[in-house]
Image (cartoon, rainbow, N blue to C red):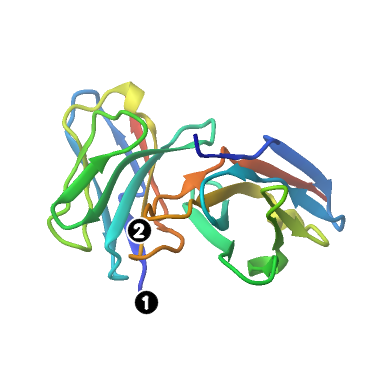
Amino acid sequence: EADIYQTPRYLVIGTGKKITLECSQTMGHDKMYWYQQDPGMELHLIHYSYGVNSTEKGDLSSESTVSRIRTEHFPLTLESARPSHTSQYLCASSPTGGGGYTFGSGTRLTVV
Amino acid sequence: AQSVAQPEDQVNVAEGNPLTVKCTYSVSGNPYLFWYVQYPNRGLQFLLKYITGDNLVKGSYGFEAEFNKSQTSFHLKKPSALVSDSALYFCAVRPGGATNKLIFGTGTLLAVQP
């Protein structure tokens, strides 16, 4: 079944560690997105990609980086995690030409 | 600036009563409109969308939404609320034109009391 997958679901990690949050989709969507969602509920776009080798920063400045080497894969990396990075991270994808987004289940990151 | 507003942070309703979650927007062109629901510790799930045609759109779990062009609104409704409808609801708009990024509202927490 076509879907979008995020791993891990939950991650607790120490300050200064490097982490990569994985996001993969099997729907053949060209466009992919990363959102950060704080306990205040609002969604903040931090990165997006419109295709392979194309990445852009979103509306909210983030210390994370992303890559898009394959259509189906859009990982997010934090080189040095800090407590301020504690949040839920949501990955989404959408087809070319419009329509809505399909979201993954999210990764809840806690940096201690 | 293009924006989506969900004026209520929280909506409280008794089980069995009708519910409305409000959404208004200010975007260019003819927008595509969406509603998503988020349960605790989960991603967003698609509920329904309006692109064109009948202003009343029916979606998952008995929800519906009415597109009102003159009022630039897209309120989410359900005739009879269930406790299991308690969740966070997001309105989203895709402005007309070449951009494909959705603009999300800030979310409304729906609490249905038994």
Q: In the visual, does A20 lie left or right of A27? A: left
Res. B58 image quadrant:
bottom right
Q: Is residue B68 left or right of residue A56?
A: right
Residue A40: % across, % down: 54, 30
Q: Which mark is residue A93?
A: 2
Residue B62, percent from left and from top: 72, 68
Looking at the image, is mark 2 or mark 1 earlier in the sequence? Answer: 1
The residue that disc 1 covers is A1
Task: Give the crowd class for mark 2: few <14, some 14-19, many >=20 residues within 10 Å.
Answer: many
Amino acid type, label 1: Glu
Q: Nearer the viewer, mark 2 or mark 1?
A: 2
Nearer to us in this view, B28 or A49? B28
Q: Nearer the viewer, residue A79 or B35?
A: B35
Above or below, comparing residue B107 to residue B100 in the picture: above
Horizontal side of A20 relative to B87 (left or right) equals: left
Q: Where is residue A49 drawn, in percent x and y?
A: 25, 51
Residue at the limit of the structure toward the bottom, as seen here: A1
Check if mark 2 and mark 1 are on a common chain.
yes
Q: Amino acid at mark 2?
A: Ser
The alpha-carbon separation of the residues under discs 2 and 1 comes to 15 Å
Q: Position of residue A24 (x, y in %)?
A: 26, 60
Placement of A84 over or under A28, stated as above or below: above
Label placed on residue B79: none
